[in-house]
Image (cartoon, rainbow, N blue to C red):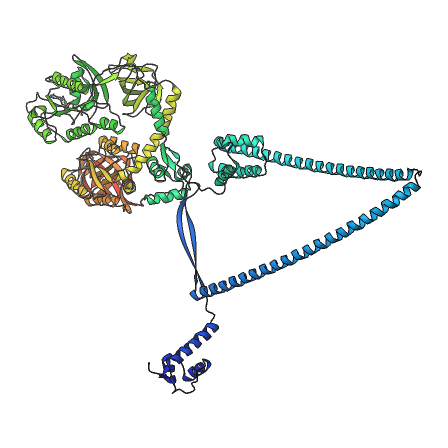
Amino acid sequence: MAETTVKKLADVVGIPVDTLLTQMKEAGLPHTDAGEGVSDEQKQQLLAHLRKSHGAQASEPSKITLKRRSTSTIKTTGAAGKAKTVNVEVRKKRTYVKRAAIEEEERLEAERKAAEEEAARLAEEEAKRKAEEEEAKRKAEEEEALRREQEAKARAEKERAAEEEKASQEKSKRASVPKTAKKAQKEETEEERAQREAEERKQREAEEARRKQEAEQRKKAEEEAARRTAEEAKRIAEELEKRGGEGQEQPREEEDDKSSSIVRDAVEAGYRTEERQSRRRRRKPKSAGVAHGQMKSSMNKQHGFKSPTEKMVYDVEIPETITVAELAQRMNIKAKELIKAMMKMGEMATVNQYIDQETAVLLTEEMGHTPKLVKGEEEALEDDLATLADYSGIDSESRAPVVTIMGHVDHGKTSLLDYIRKAKVAAGEAGGITQHIGAYHVPHEKGMITFLDTPGHAAFTAMRARGAKATDIVIIVVAADDGVMPQTEEAINHAKAAGVPLIIAVNKIDKENADPDRVKNELATKDVIPEEWGGEYQFINVSAHSGQGIDDLLDAVLLQAELLELKAPATGPASGVVIESRVEKGRGTVASILVQSGELNVGDMLLAGAHYGRVRALVDENGQQVKKAGPSIPVEVLGLDGAPEAGEQVQVLPDEKKAREVAEFRQERDRDVKLKRQQASKLENLFENMGSAEASQVNIVLKTDVRGSLEALIGALNDLSTDEVKVSLVSAGVGAINESDVNLAMTSEAVLLGFNVRADSKAKRLCEQEGIDLRYYSVIYELIDDVKQAMSGLLAPEKREEILGTAEVRDVFRSSKFGAVAGCMVVEGTLYRNRPIRVLRDDVVVFEGELESLRRFKDDVAEVRNGMECGIAVKSYNDVKEGDKIEVFEVKEVARSL
Ligand SMILES: Nc1nc2c(ncn2[C@@H]2O[C@H](COP(=O)(O)OP(=O)(O)OP(=O)(O)O)[C@@H](O)[C@H]2O)c(=O)[nH]1
């Protein structure tokens, strides 16, 4: 390879030439000039030098330790069954060691080992040498000792021989010497020994006593410790039993740990007490007698914190309503958690808010517990009543069908019933209009039939509104000369909605212009197809005057009844339904009751809706007192403490206490229901009510002045229906708002809207009584807009018409100045001169405008109060008639109550 120069090398390396020359010099190279050549070997030499010097200078780390810390969260279930989040921090530590360092370490290790081995070898040699030296020394000593012993032996032998010789010489010399001295010496030695022995004995005895004392003390200490352990174990056992009885799961485990540790300590200390053993036997019968090691390990398993492995599932009792806090408590969770769960389900609630049973059940299931439905007070009471009306063991017998006659005004309902009863009820009535609801049972050769005489269908709907089903069959009366009229249609709809079979009585067949086929045709278009045309409805031609076809009608009723297989127990405590009730002077509360099951007797304790009382007397439809009444028999009952509503259930109860309890409860419930209904019937509450699933439908009962406006409104209201909210016209008709409309609105929770019509007096009274919201409109757009706004919850500043006063036109006379002047009587509120007015004919608006003049006698007045007469001239309206009503109103802006 071609040589390079110092300068080129400095350029390649990127350092000044001088520096490179210095480094080359340090590497032991001869270069001094930039132009000198550098061979490959010299480059290697320079490199080796640089590596060496750098290695010495730079204290390269031989070991790198990396620490990584990561934090994550896990969700777990806590002791109380609630979820909790735990932060988990994972710390990882990695150590990287440089290869060279390892090699160096290995080399050093090898050197160290070699050194150690060398040292060990040297030490061994040293030890060996020392051992040899010692052995030699020991041998030399032994030899020396042996030599000395032999010398001593030889010397002793010599001395003994010499002594023996001397002794034999002396023996002969002192043959007669006394032995006293020797004896004395001997006695002295024995004394000493006895003394020594006595001392030794004493010492032994003292030692023995000390040891005994020590043993006794130890024994005492052991016994004391054992006693204390036993006492502790007993106390814990008692505590455990106590807590176990209270069903406290968690503390028991903690106590187990505590006691097990005490027991273990006692076992390890070698203490066993009877109490402890018996306790252990009681707690763990299977492990009684297990080896110590096993016992210890099993105890160790229990020791320490024990996270509950399974979530507790509770049976949660759920009444009809419950607060959020109470429900949370029953699930052993915090109310906050429950509110969170509700939010997830799209429900917003506060801690003290009441939620219904259905929601509570959903929530309980959502939280993983088992809901147990608890009956509400009302349900429980009604269940109680059901058990009291026990007809087990009493055979059901056939009973008479209960028939309601419905139909358009003057089509002959009363005349028909009258003919059947052979009594002239219609003739006695003022204006021929039935004024009250009555009930009569009519014996017929083929069986008995009970008739409810109802004016129109108000009573029928009133009963339905209370959930009563008093009627088995409905007879729809249609005058053959008049055909199907609006109320005929309504009656049919009501009967169909109630699921009651219909029979059509085509009345006034005796009349010349009677056209029964027209009736058939008209009804067929309403889906009431005659049997002879393949339909299911019996059409019977009758005449309430001549009696033609009446038997056929009764036959038809009994045939239908047969198909219905009507049966009821004829004895046992009576139950039934209120048909009507009133308070009569001198008689008190009179309630017409239709017995449906069992037998009603004088003296029975009767519960009727929210009223009760002992039956003082029973009166039949002919005014005769009777002692008892069986199924399908209507009777007047005297003795109740108040007038129950038509349609209320009645039941005979065994005692007054129960009757009073239920009656009081129902009175309270009725107050709540009324309040709820008032809320529901208000248009401005529509949106609020729509929050609940069942209220995604707006029910409307609509009455208008003329067919044209009715059709226009029906079309416009139906067009308002959206996917979310449906507009449902429960009823829509022409004419004043009557009782039936109010009842229907009540039953279907509908809003009652009147377009250019007013409620008649009975309807108005019912609305006030039941708190039904009634709205009058005179502009189609306003009615539509209000419903639309209500649907979207935007029913903003309400503009409501308030009727300030109403006057009835008693007379009409002509004035040259004003034209027609109406002589009026103010029947409601106050009439004001400067307010807008409307003229109503049959409760339908016929004119809207203002007053020309308002006078009391000859004076112009600003206002006329209720009960006063006045003269009214209506501006630009000369068609006012006797019987008309003039109402004064104003438009008020009312703040919405949303
Ligand atoms: N010619 C004839 N007239 C009848 C017949 N039935 C009823 N009428 C007459 O029709 C009128 C009305 O009869 P009601 O029985 O009062 O009719 P309603 O349906 O009970 O009437 P409201 O009680 O007002 O609802 C009376 O003048 C009866 O005399 C019939 O079969 N033939």
Give how far across and how far down residue 283 sits, in percent: 50, 32
Residue 815 is left or right of residue 602, and the answer is left
Image: 576 above or below 754: above
Along the line of sight, the residue nearer the viewer: 398 or 578: 398
Count how many numbered circles sit on residues in the image.
0
Along the line of sight, the residue nearer the viewer: 818 or 93: 93
Give how far across and how far down residue 240 sits, in percent: 52, 33
Image: 672 above or below 617: below
The answer to whether one can see residue 610 in this image is: no
Along the line of sight, the residue nearer the viewer: 21 or 416: 21
Residue 182 is left or right of residue 473, and the answer is right
Residue 191 is left or right of residue 525, and the answer is right
Residue 94 is left or right of residue 461, and the answer is right
Image: 104 above or below 882: below
Q: Quadrant of residue 202?
A: top right
Q: Residue at x 71, y 54 (%)?
A: 143
Tell me the quarter of the image containing the C terminus: top left
Give how far across and how far down residue 663 sits, in percent: 36, 25
Q: Residue at x 23, y 19 (%)?
A: 439
Image: 451 above or below 30: above
Give how far across and how far down residue 896 sits, in percent: 31, 45
Tell me the quarter of the image containing the N terminus: bottom left
The answer to whether one can see residue 825 in this image is: yes
Quadrant position of ligand 1: top left
